Image: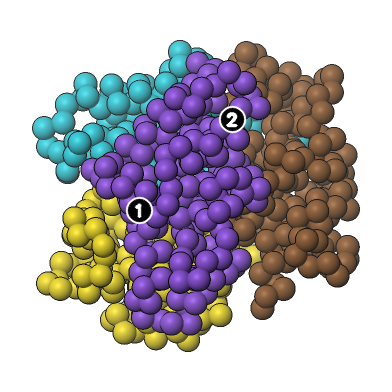
Chain colours: A cyan, B yellow, C purple, D brown
Amino acid sequence: MFYDECVQALLDRGVKIEDIANCAEFLHKPYQNDITKEEIIANIQEILKKREVQNAVLTAIELDRLCEEDKFHNKEFQKAVLDDDGLYGIDEVLAYGICNIYGSIALTNFGYIDKVKPGIIGVLNEPQKGCCNTFLDDIVGAIAASAASRLAHGKKD
Amino acid sequence: MFYDECVQALLDRGVKIEDIANCAEFLHKPYQNDITKEEIIANIQEILKKREVQNAVLTAIELDRLCEEDKFHNKEFQKAVLDDDGLYGIDEVLAYGICNIYGSIALTNFGYIDKVKPGIIGVLNEPQKGCCNTFLDDIVGAIAASAASRLAHGKKD
Amino acid sequence: MFYDECVQALLDRGVKIEDIANCAEFLHKPYQNDITKEEIIANIQEILKKREVQNAVLTAIELDRLCEEDKFHNKEFQKAVLDDDGLYGIDEVLAYGICNIYGSIALTNFGYIDKVKPGIIGVLNEPQKGCCNTFLDDIVGAIAASAASRLAHGKKD
Amino acid sequence: MFYDECVQALLDRGVKIEDIANCAEFLHKPYQNDITKEEIIANIQEILKKREVQNAVLTAIELDRLCEEDKFHNKEFQKAVLDDDGLYGIDEVLAYGICNIYGSIALTNFGYIDKVKPGIIGVLNEPQKGCCNTFLDDIVGAIAASAASRLAHGKKD
C-alpha cells in the first residue's frame, strides 16, 4: 500500500491535502454549512487509504512527470498530452476510476468541479512552461468529488 | 429499434427535441459560437437512433410513470424515488449508461449540467404534485451532454 | 436504508444469501482455498448495507415484478425486457452501478460470471412462463462479483 | 488522429490486427457461425479509428514501455506495475475507457476474455524477463470485446 508515497507525490507536485479539502468544501458546504475542515481532511485521508485510489494517483503523477521529462516514445502524442488537448480524455478516465468507487454523486460532483475549476484545480490547469499537470488536476478533482460524496452519504446515515 | 417510440414518449412527458437541443447548445456554444440549432438537433436524433440510448430512455420513462401511478411494491422505496432523494443514484446510473457511449467529455458535461440545470432540466426538476420526473431529467441531461460531446469530437475532425 | 427490505425482496424472488455466496465462492476459491462460507456471507452482508447497492437491488426487483405483471406502458418494449433480449443492456447497466463501487476486479468478475452462469444465476436465467428475472440474475452476479473483489482486496491487506 | 500510429505501436509490441481478430472471433462465433475474418478485421479497424480508443492504446503502450525501461520515479510502484499485481487495476480502468464506448455487451465480453485469456492475450500475459505487457493485454482484450459487441449490434440491425 502506498499511502505515504501518495501524500508525498502530491506534495512534490504542489498539492497539499488542504488544497484538496478546499475543493471538497466548495462542493459540500452548500449542503452542510457546519462542516469543519478537519472532517473534510479526515475524509480525504480515508479516500487516500484505498488501494485503487493510490494506484490512480501514482499512475497519473508518473504520466505527468514522464511527459514533462520528454520520455514518451511518440512525440506527437506526447505533445497532445502535454497540451491537455480537450479531446484527450484518458486523464478523465483515470479520474472516473476513483469516482466510481464513491458512487454517482462523486461522478456528478467531478463533472461540475472539472468545469468550474475552483482553487488548486484552476492553478494546476494554468499552462506553465515545461510543466505537465494534465492528469493531476483531474485526480485532485476526483478526490475532492469523492470526499464530497462520502460526506453526503455519511451525513444522512 | 424504438426511435419513434422514444421521441413520442419524451413528448408525452413534456420534452421536445428542441428542449434537449437548448441544453446541448448551453454546453457547446462557448466552444463553437456559430453552431446552428439544426446541427444540434441532427446530433440528438443520431443519439436517439442508438439502441442502448433507446433502452435507457424507455426504461427511465417506465420507471417514472409506474412510480407516479403508485405501482411500486415497496411503498417506502417508491417514496424515496418519487422525492428524488439526493442519495438515490440509480437515475444517474441510467444516465451514465448513455454518457459512457459518448466518452469522457459526455460524462463531465453531464455532471456540470446536472448541477446547473438549465432550461427544461430545471423545469423537470421542480417538484410537482402527483408527477415523477426523477429519471427523466437525468436522461435529458445525458442526451444533451452526449450531443455536446459528439459535436466537440466532430468539430475537431 | 433498506437492508432488511433487500434481503426479503431477494428471498421473495427465490434468492438466498447462501445462493449468492456460492457464486462468490466459485469466483474467489481458486485464489484462496481456505475461505469459509461464513466469511463470504459476512462480505455479502456488508455489500448489502451500502445504500447504492440497496437502491440497485430494489429498482431491479421492481422492474422485474412490474414487467411480469404486464404494467409497462409500451408493450413491445415490455416484451423485449421480458425476453431478456441480448441487446437490452440496462440490466447490466444497473449491475455495473454495484460493481463500480468495488473496483475493477468486481467488473471483470461480473463479466466472467455473466457468461458462465454458475448456480442460482443459471437457474434465474432459465426462461419460465410468466416470470421475469431479466434484472435479478445480473444483480445477483454483481453482488457475487463484488464480494469476490472485496475478498481479494481484504486478503492482501 | 493517430490511427497509423496505433496499428504500428501494436505491431511493435507484437500484436497484429489478426491476433485481435482471433480473440473477437472467439467471443462472437458462438452467436454467428458464418462470420468471416474479413468482417471482424473491418470492425476492429473501425474501432481503432475512434479518437478515445487511440488515446487509450497509445497511453497504455507508453506506460508499458516506460515501465520496462525503468523510467518510473517510484521504483516500488514500478515493480507492482511490472509484476501486473492482481490488485493493480489501472490497466482495466484504461480498458473500460474503450469498452464503455461499445456498451454493456463489450464490458461483459471483456470480463470474460480477461479470465479465459485466449490466443494473444494469454501470450502477452506470460511473464517475460525485461518485458512489461501489463497494460497491453487488457487493451487487446478491450478492443476484441468491443468488436464482438459491435458485431452483435450490427447483426441484429
Q: Identify the image quadrant of the C terminus of chain D.
A: bottom right
In front of the other: C121 or A12: C121
Answer few, some or many: residues within 10 Å of disc 2's Cα (few below 14, many 20 plus, some between 14 and 19): many
The disc label shown at residue C12, or none: 1
The numbered mark, 1 or 2, whose residue comes first in the sequence reads: 1
- Determine which residue is flagged by label 2: C28
Tell me the element at label 2.
helix
Q: Is residue D21 left or right of residue C65?
A: right
Q: Is residue C12 left or right of residue B148?
A: left
Q: Residue at x 39, y 55 (%)?
A: C13
Q: Identify the image quadrant of the N terminus of chain D.
A: bottom right
Amino acid carrying mark 2 in the image:
His
The reply to whether residue B32 is visible in this rendering is no
Q: Position of residue C98 (x, y in %)?
A: 44, 45
Q: Quadrant of residue D58?
A: top right
Badge 2: chain ID: C
Q: Position of residue D112 (x, y in %)?
A: 68, 46
Amino acid carrying mark 1 in the image:
Asp
Above or below D136: residue C57: below
Q: Position of residue D8 (x, y in %)?
A: 85, 47
In front of the other: C15 or A136: C15
Distance in Å between CA atoms under marks 1 and 2: 27 Å
Q: Residue at x 53, y 19 (%)?
A: C155
Badge 1: chain ID: C
Q: Position of residue A127 (x, y in %)?
A: 49, 39
Above or below C78: residue D17: above
